[in-house]
Amino acid sequence: MMRIDTLTVGQMQVNCYILSSKTTKNAILLDPGDEYSRIKAYLDKHKLKPKFIMHTHGHIDHIQADNEFALPVYVHSLDSELLRNPDKNLSSFLNVPFKVKLDVKTVEDLAEIKLDDLVLQVIHTPGHTPGGICLKNAQGIFTGDTLFAGGIGRTDFPGASYEQLIKSIQDKLLVLPDETVIYPGHGPCSTIGEEKRSNPYARIR
């Protein structure tokens, strides 16, 4: 079983997930959006060894601690430019222009991300950003800013599309078993079944 630790970081309260092997303690950092020192202290305290960074998408609130970790970074190919462009990752609008200066590697839909005994499947869910992804394994699905408990990601940013986001949710997420746990980019966890019942944006039409 994969160990899942969650730190909520930054002004925008992003869920940074630390996904680690219980056998080796090697870890994937998922969306380390801010507070490098706090994340690093947590890793050190629990003797977890980060090997690379994985992003659900390229907005500033999910990527801001990247450069301090100095690890390989993975993102969907359609969001790779966001990591390099402050206008597209929204940091320019916050008056803190930011670029990821590390080695950025790209992934595509249905790719498998592996680290020791950890395996995550990439599910491309465009709408919040062109290259937004979710990451699925037997323990649940990390939905980034695609699907929240009771809500969905914003679609009023450059490159976003409400119609595309709803299609991604209906075609790729709501088809999963009801008991599937969702680990969103902001806010509390939920399940696919609960979102079908109570999320006004996530009902099969």
Image (cartoon, rainbow, N blue to C red):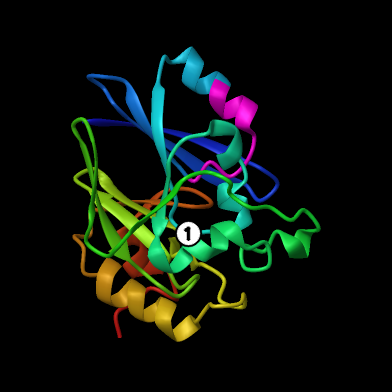
In the rendered image of this protein, does residue 24 appear above or below residue 189?
A: above
Which range of residues does the magenta coloring cover? 31-40
**Residue 49: x and y, percent?**
39, 22
Per the image, the residue denoted by label 1 is 57
Left or right: residue 158 versus residue 131 is right
Q: Nearer the viewer, residue 80 or 4?
A: 80
In the rendered image of this protein, does residue 149 appear above or below residue 205?
A: above
At 53% from the left and 59% from the top, the residue drawn is: 58
Indicate yes or no whether the magenta region holds residue 161. no
At 35% from the left and 58% from the top, the residue drawn is: 134
Q: Quadrant of residue 149?
A: bottom left
Residue 124 visible here: yes
Left or right: residue 24 versus residue 6 is left
In the rendered image of this protein, does residue 6 appear above or below residue 184?
A: above
Q: Quadrant of residue 35?
A: top right
Q: Quadrant of the N terminus?
A: top left
Instruction: Tell me the SS state at disc 1.
Output: loop
Mark 1 packing: few (<14 Cα in 10 Å), some, or many (20+)?
Answer: many
